Structure formats: structure tokens, C-alpha cells
Image: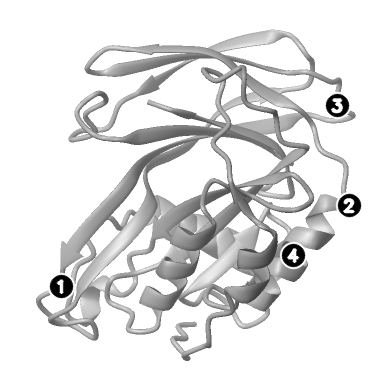
């Protein structure tokens, strides 16, 4: 199902109680957040109602709430708008499949854009700031696992990462790795956004399960750097998060600039 109804943005609640805060394994002097909220935005450059949601993600990404949650946004561009006049250059089938898996569990209306999912639990129209605020407040009351990125190194083709979960967990967790562009811009020539210059933040270029763990030991993994993803030549982030099996709740996360 595709929906692109317009919704009014609500920034006021965030402006009152949010502060800038970049937390990473390379910045030990920065106070660690109490928890991390992964906010996934399923969007498309072919959807005329998506730019307000893209703007909302820009407003909240890498900000910290009054509950000391670090908000980590991930912009996941789906493919099903590509046949309607404009092929989104950031779209990948993996993001469409990920949204579909969420829809089967969280969304009676099916997949639509723009759609936000907070820590794999709550979904709502991606431009609805009030719904986002409620979801973040609910998530702040839940317990989380501390996931730590201990180190990372890279060459032109491989990113090597060491990480750990600092507390034992009751069941196995999938560890998902995401590589993002900090920002991207497109001049759209066709489709519903024809003639517009669109700006995006935290654009996913790679997303995959890279481990399944059930302990607090250190784990080392190797991530194949996707074509065109040039670490060191542009601003990027690595995001790791621990998610319950079958794409359930996200219970711990950390991000690191590359």
C-alpha cells in the first residue's frame, strides 16, 4: 500500500527540550547518553509528501532529548516509487524489504511513505512530530542494552569493527550495521517533486545483519564497503544496533563518525 497524505510538522516540542550532542567511541569526554533511539525514516524522492519528513529527520538527527536519549536517524529510500517518474538514486531493495517486514508486524495499512519507525516498536507517518515525541517518551522508559563500538579501521574496500554488548542478554540479538552519508542533495527532474532540490540527512547506503550475539564478549566483524562509498572523502557514520530476532525491537545502539 502506498500513501502520501500530507501531515503538518510539529517541531515545537523538540525545540524546547533537545540539545545538540554527538556521542561516539572517539569522543570519551562527551557524556554518554542514557539510551539511543534509532529512528528509521522510509522515504522516497518520488513522493511529494516525503520532504517534510526528511526535514523533520534533519531537525532531530544526533540530538539528545531531555531524557538523555541520543536520536540516531536513518533515511532508508524505498524502491516502489521508482516506476512513477523518478528513480531515487539512494533507493535500494533492501530498504523496501525492511519496511515490508515492519509493515507485517506494525502497520495494518501496509507499507507507505513517509513512515517512521522508532526502535523497531512504534510506527507513524514520518512527518508527524507529535507522534515522534510520544514514541521517544515511551522508549525512554524501557530498559536498553549498552552496545559499544570499541574500534574501527578501514581501507578502500573493508571496514573492520570491534564491538561488545556490556550486559548479558536473555536471548540472542541480531547486530545490524548501517553505513550512512551524513548528507546528500538531489535536483529532481521528474515525478511528483519535479523541479525541487531535495536535501537528506543520514542516508543509508548499506544495511545488513553482521552478527548474532548472546554475550558480553568482544566481537570483530568485517564490512565490505559498497561501491562509491568513499570513507575519508566525505562525511559518513557507522551505526550499529542490536535488534531482537525477526526484525523486532531495537534494544541498544551506538554510532561513530567515519
Q: Nearer the viewer, mark 2 or mark 1?
A: 2
Mark 2, residue position: 141
Residue picked out by circle 1: 188
On the image, the x and y values in percent for residue 205 come to 33, 43
- The span from disc 3 to disc 1 (Cα, nearest Å) is 46 Å
Residue 210 screen position, x and y as percent = 53, 27
Q: Which residue in the protein does label 4 denote?
A: 135
* Residue at 52% across, 55% down: 98
- Number of callouts: 4
Residue holding disc 3? 169
Q: Within 10 angstroms of label 1, few (less than 14), some, or many (20 or more) residues? A: some
First of labels 2, 1 by sequence position:
2
> Residue 108 location in percent, x, y?
68, 80
Residue 51 as seen in the image, left or right of residue 238:
left
Residue 171: image x %, image y %? 84, 30
Label 2: few (<14), some (14–19) or many (≥20) C-alpha neighbours in 10 Å:
few
Mark 4 vs mark 3: give the one in front.
4
Regarding residue 107, the answer to whether it shows in the image is: no
Element at label 2: loop
Give me the C-alpha separation between circle 4 and circle 1: 32 Å
Q: Residue furthest left?
A: 189
Quarter where residue 218 is shown: top right
Of pointers 4 and 1, the one earlier in the residue sequence = 4
Mark 2 or 4, nearer chain start: 4
Residue 240 shown left or right of residue 44 in the figure? right
Earlier along the polypeptide chain: callout 3 or callout 2? 2
Are the two marked residues, 3 and 1, in contact with CB atoms closer than 8 angstroms? no
Amino acid at each position: 500500500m502506498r500513501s502520501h497524505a500530507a501531515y503538518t510538522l510539529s517541531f515545537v516540542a523538540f525545540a524546547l527540550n533537545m540539545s545538540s550532542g554527538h556521542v561516539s567511541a572517539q569522543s570519551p569526554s562527551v557524556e554518554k547518553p542514557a539510551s539511543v533511539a534509532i529512528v528509521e525514516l522510509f522515504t522516497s524522492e518520488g513522493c511529494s509528501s516525503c520532504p517534510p519528513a526528511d526535514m523533520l529527520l534533519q531537525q532531530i538527527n544526533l540530538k539528545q532529548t531531555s531524557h538523555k536519549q541520543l536520536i540516531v536517524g536513518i533515511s532508508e529510500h524505498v524502491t516502489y516509487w521508482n516506476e512513477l517518474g523518478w528513480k531515487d538514486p539512494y533507493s535500494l531493495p533492501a530498504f523496501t524489504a525492511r519496511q515490508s517486514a515492519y509493515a507485517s508486524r506494525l502497520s495494518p495499512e501496509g507499507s507507505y511513505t513517509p513512515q517512521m519507525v522508532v526502535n523497531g516498536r512504534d510506527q507513524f507517518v514520518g512527518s508527524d512530530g507529535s507522534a515522534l515525541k510520544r514514541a521517544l517518551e515511551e522508549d525512554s522508559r524501557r530498559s536498553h542494552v549498552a552496545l559499544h563500538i570499541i574500534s574501527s579501521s578501514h581501507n578502500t574496500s573493508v571496514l573492520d569493527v570491534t564491538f561488545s554488548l556490556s550486559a548479558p542478554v536473555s536471548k540472542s540479538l541480531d547486530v545490524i550495521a548501517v553505513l550512512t552519508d551524513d548528507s546528500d542533495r538531489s535536483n529532481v527532474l521528474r515525478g511528483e517533486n519535479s523541479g525541487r532540490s531535495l536535501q537528506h540527512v543520514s542516508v543509508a547506503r548499506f544495511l545488513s545483519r553482521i552478527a548474532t550475539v548472546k554475550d558480553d564478549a568482544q566481537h570483530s566483524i568485517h564490512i565490505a564497503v559498497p561501491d562509491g562509498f568513499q570513507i575519508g572523502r566525505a562525511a559518513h557514520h557507522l551505526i550499529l544496533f542490536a535488534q531482537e530476532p525477526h526484525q523486532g525491537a531495537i534494544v541498544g545502539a551506538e554510532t561513530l563518525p567515519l
